[in-house]
Image (cartoon, grey):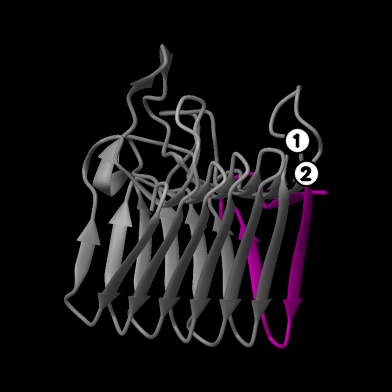
Amino acid sequence: GSFGRGYVTVDGAGSFLAAYGDAPRMQVGRGSNNSNPGYGYGRLDITNGGVAGTLEVQIGRGDGVGIVTVTGDGSQLNAGSAYGLQSYYNGNSYVGDAARAVIGRQGGDGRLILSDGGTFTHENIDGLTDGPALDIGRDENSFGRLDITGAGSAATLRQNGPTGDDDDESATLAIGRGGDAEVNVSQGGVLNVLGDGANIQMGDAFNTESSQGSGSLNVYDGGIVNVDAGSYEGGFFVL
């Protein structure tokens, strides 16, 4: 949704929504930008085994409000290099970068809710890209929230292969990267950050000119968080 309201439902096994190509993305709840102010509300519901995917997922951007729910066994939201590759933007090269998913950006309010077996997975392709990342609450005046509830529900960032051969980044979850963020993992839900250099960063600044973010990670009622570099270096929190 941009300057209006948009609703999409992907329901049932075999139902599939995807964006492919050169730097493809899904934006749910896109509001203003520098040249075109406005407000947007968007909602994407993935249910009963439906699947949606693209390279880069953005939920709640630019004063917009975005909500994505992934509910039920087999229901998936996927992001990663299988759908396309980064290239050049504003004179900068992003070749080799597996892209950052974002929940709450540039004053937006974003929510991703995984329940009853719903999953979100963001991963690179070894030999092509490195550094699948998720920013929750990026930039000042932004808010992002991730809820993972129920057995089988999981959010996974996975760095396949070593970092550095395609890009310098690793699997990174940033909770409060200049904005405000909340992550809740409960009732058997699982949060995974995996592979070379796997890390979770809490309450960081987006850049040297931005303010410090605020983030909370709440794990309760049997929720599980794994930060595991496997045979590689990493597996750490930055608080």
Horizontal side of residue 172 vs 160, given as left or right: right
- 237 in the magenta segment: yes
Report which residue position mark 1 lands on.
205
Q: CA distance from mark 1 to mark 2?
A: 6 Å
Horizontal side of residue 41 vs 232, given as left or right: left
Of 227 and 115, nearer the camera is 115
- Please identify the quarter of the rendering in which residue 89 is found: top left
Q: Residues within 10 Å of mark 2 (few under 14, many from 20)?
A: many
User: Magenta region: which residues?
Assistant: 214-239
Which numbered disc flags the more N-terminal residue, 1 or 2? 1
Assign a secondary structure to mark 1. loop
Q: Which labelled disc corresponds to residue 213?
A: 2
Amino acid, disc 2: Gly
Assign a secondary structure to mark 2. loop
Q: Residue at x 73, y 39 (%)?
A: 178
Residue 13, x across and y down, in percent: 21, 81
Q: Residue at x 49, y 41 (%)?
A: 38
Q: Residues within 10 Å of mark 1 (few under 14, many from 20)?
A: many
Amino acid, disc 1: Ala
Of 158 and 99, nearer the camera is 99
Residue 59, x across and y down, in percent: 48, 53
- 20 in the magenta segment: no
Q: Is residue 56 above or below residue 94?
A: below
Q: Is residue 7 above or below residue 233?
A: below
Horizontal side of residue 126 vs 187, given as left or right: left
- Please identify the quarter of the rendering in which residue 230 is found: bottom right
Residue 98, x across and y down, in percent: 41, 39
User: How many discs appear?
Assistant: 2
Residue 62, x across and y down, in percent: 54, 41
Tag 1 near tag 2, CB within 8 Å = yes
